[in-house]
Amino acid sequence: MTHNRQNNKHEILDTLKTVFGFHAFRPNQEEIVKSILDGRDVFAAMPTGGGKSLCYQLPSRLMNGTAIIVSPLISLMKDQVDAARQNGIAAAYMNSSLSSQEVTELYRALRNNRIELLYIAPERFAMLGFIDTLKSVPVSLFAIDEAHCVSEWGHDFRPDYLSLSVIPNIFPKVPIAAFTATATPKVQEDICRKLGLRAPFLVRASFNRPNLYYQVERKTQVETQIIEFLRGHPDEPGIIYRTTRDSVTDTADFLARNGIKALPYHAGLSTDIRDKNQDAFNRDEASVIVATIAFGMGIDKSNVRFVVHADLPKNIEGYYQETGRAGRDGEPAHCLLFFGRGDIPKIRFFIDQIADDTERSMSLDKLNQVVKFASHNVCRRRQLLGYFGEEYPADNCGNCDICTGSVEQFDITRDAQIIMSAVSRTQERFGIGHIVDIVTGADTKRIRELQHDMIKTYGAGKDRDKKHWRFIVDELIAQDALRQEGEPYPVLKLTEKGQNALYGREQVAALKRDAEKRKGQTKGGIFEQYDTALFERLRSLRKGIAEEEQVPPFVVFSDKTLHEMCRCYPATLADMRKTSGVGDSKLKRYGDAFVSEIKRYLSENPGITIPERQAVSFDRPRTTEKKTGETVEETYRLLTKGMSMEEIARERNLSQSTISGHIEKLIKNGRDIEIDRIIEPAKRRRIEELFMTTKQWGLGAVVEQGEDAVAYEEARIVRAWMERKEV
Ligand code: ADP
Ligand code: ZN
């Protein structure tokens, strides 16, 4: 069953293109595929969206026999099978929803080697006769999805998974590949042992999700805040997490009343309703799902564009998992957490119910870590990855609120000392409110009774308001200079770091973010833009097809694939085939429909120039189209002679839109361009402003907002210019 690597490199790449439509592997995929083809066991911890399914689907195509895929959720199997079939793979699933006749037929197909991929639930392995039947089938490999379910240390332990441990004994020659998106090193070891993996090829991918933008906002009127956020993301599919069933219902109602297609999801709803709502979300019929964390593993939807946490999550693992459901297709997605200290006692209440001492204190630690994540002014990405033991290499991730806001560091040592002195002089026996009262010199009954108006720090911070002093306390807690202890009324205690600061042995600094600047952040500045008007059209075409075929839209084409179409405008089947995500099977099924729609769009919008492909896609082998390169150079030559866009167009007998395309390319390539000669400064600033206020990188919105004063070509050039400045 092993494969000769040398002979098959070409075959592997060819399959990647023709079956899956991809031009290049994502990190680790190639090594995993090759290990499996070599007959070696694999353990792979890769983040959600890392492309795990390809790791077993591709080898299954090249190996003889059936690949058995163990997947925990029956509800997902159908979508997984549909998605594989869309790529022309002979896939099937076996679960309790099949009739006994269907099962018999399936067995026959298996014995006749007609199935490449078979999805089953783990409980199958414990069923009488199943393994014996499997022995009569040529099995190429076993892939265990969500492998952390086998470990009690993981957060999703499923006893059924333990029955998988028989596989290596019964099928000693068949490779086993285990995949998970959550393994801590401890869980990893447990998985390898429980599944009996034999000297597996180990992969621990980075858990960084570069396309996710992380943001934390102070929680005030959360429902209104959500509406405001949704206004910036019209019609985009997204998830809003809430802690309780009641708040899910309330928020879903509130959104519906405000004209947003939102549906609720929580464990208190009947299975029917839950399935129906999830289905509507999957099929892009409802754009927003408001859910408790019960809405979890069942989400395979790759085009979730945002995940909002309206309440504080209980721990970082959960937060990472939940936000991880955004942007599986690799396109930009927004993760927003509304953080209010008021949520802390609510979670504490639940933690206090935990009977086991160690477990309770572990949960408390975890809660403190989320609070730190939300309140500490440190790159969110760095903090998340740090939690999983991974060090983020760069200083600035460029895609979280901290790194993209203008962050100013300032010294708070003096203020910190005032607070800590008040804490120390009252013998560390009081909570935040009272300490703030002392430093601001409040005249309360309690202060008078305790004679706290007599201590030296009383009123030492009168010049600033309470909000400021609360901020200082928050900051000190976040930085571990103060710690909260005891219940139900936690008091403030000085830590070692706090002592050092109090006695002037250590400085304390805080970071202040510029709220204005942060608001101007357009998500995913590092990502390429696409034609949003065309996207809307292709999206609705996709939806129609999906309805006809009864599959979720993202199974037809991912958002990523549509976005690429909206950058490259493939108007022939040959061009369409070059698009990432378009394999032979999908080209045959949908190529014509999409090509016609794009052609129609282009004929309605004659101003659009089609960019050279190499300029817009990084994972495509470079095909140098000399001709276009030369014509761009000619434009450059005329520009440096001082000619305007109009003059160049006239001189070269080309449209202004073509010339603007050339200029765009020149700017993007970092060429020396005198922008003020092309677009006068006042106008350029006006267009820049429009881009910032519409918060969209598409050209349409800006041209429209510019009310005839802004031409498409101008918007395009300014956009390129703005991007260049950011680098
Ligand atoms: P995971 O199971 O790891 O969360 P998936 O297997 O669902 O991830 O893949 C996530 C998305 O990435 C899918 O839309 C898939 O088509 C896409 N994808 C996978 N591999 C590649 C690749 N090599 N190039 C481009 N897209 C890919
Ligand atoms: Zn960052």
Image (cartoon, rainbow, N blue to C red):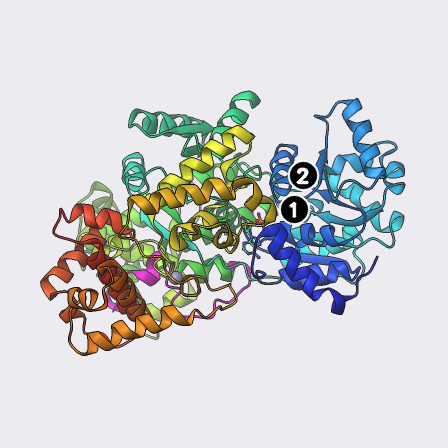
Q: Position of residue 419 (x, y in %)?
A: 28, 59
Point out the residue furthest to the left here.
Answer: 682
Point out the image quarter for the N terminus.
bottom right
Q: Position of residue 321 (x, y in %)?
A: 52, 47
Point out the image quarter for the C terminus.
bottom left
In the foreground, 55 or 314: 55
Q: Which residue is mark 1?
A: 146
Kindly identify the residue that appears in the image at 27 percent across and 54 percent down. 471
Q: Is residue 417 visible?
A: no
Q: Is residue 586 visible?
A: yes
Q: Position of residue 276 (x, y in %)?
A: 51, 24
Q: Which residues are magenta?
A: 387-414
Cα separation, mark 2 vs mark 1, equals 7 Å
Residue 329 horizontal side relative to residue 247, left or right: right
Secondary structure beneath label 2: loop
Please determine whether, in this image, residue 108 is positioned above or below residue 42: above
Residue 658 horizontal side relative to residue 243, left or right: left
Q: Is 402 colored magenta in this rendering?
A: yes
Q: Position of residue 39 (x, y in %)?
A: 80, 59
Q: Quadrant of ligand 2?
A: bottom left
Mark 2 Cα-neighbour bin, 10 Å: few <14, some 14–19, many ≥20:
many
- Corner quadrant of residue 377: bottom left
Kindly identify the residue that appears in the image at 72 percent across and 31 percent down. 95
- Name the amino acid, label 1: Glu
- Corner quadrant of residue 90: top right
Mark 1 Cα-neighbour bin, 10 Å: few <14, some 14–19, many ≥20:
many
Residue 338 horizontal side relative to residue 544, left or right: left
Ranked by sequence position, the earlier of labels 2 and 1 is 2
Q: Answer whether labels 2 and 1 touch (C-beta < 8 Å).
A: yes
In the foreground, 426 or 514: 514
In the foreground, 622 or 634: 634
Q: Which residue is mark 2?
A: 72
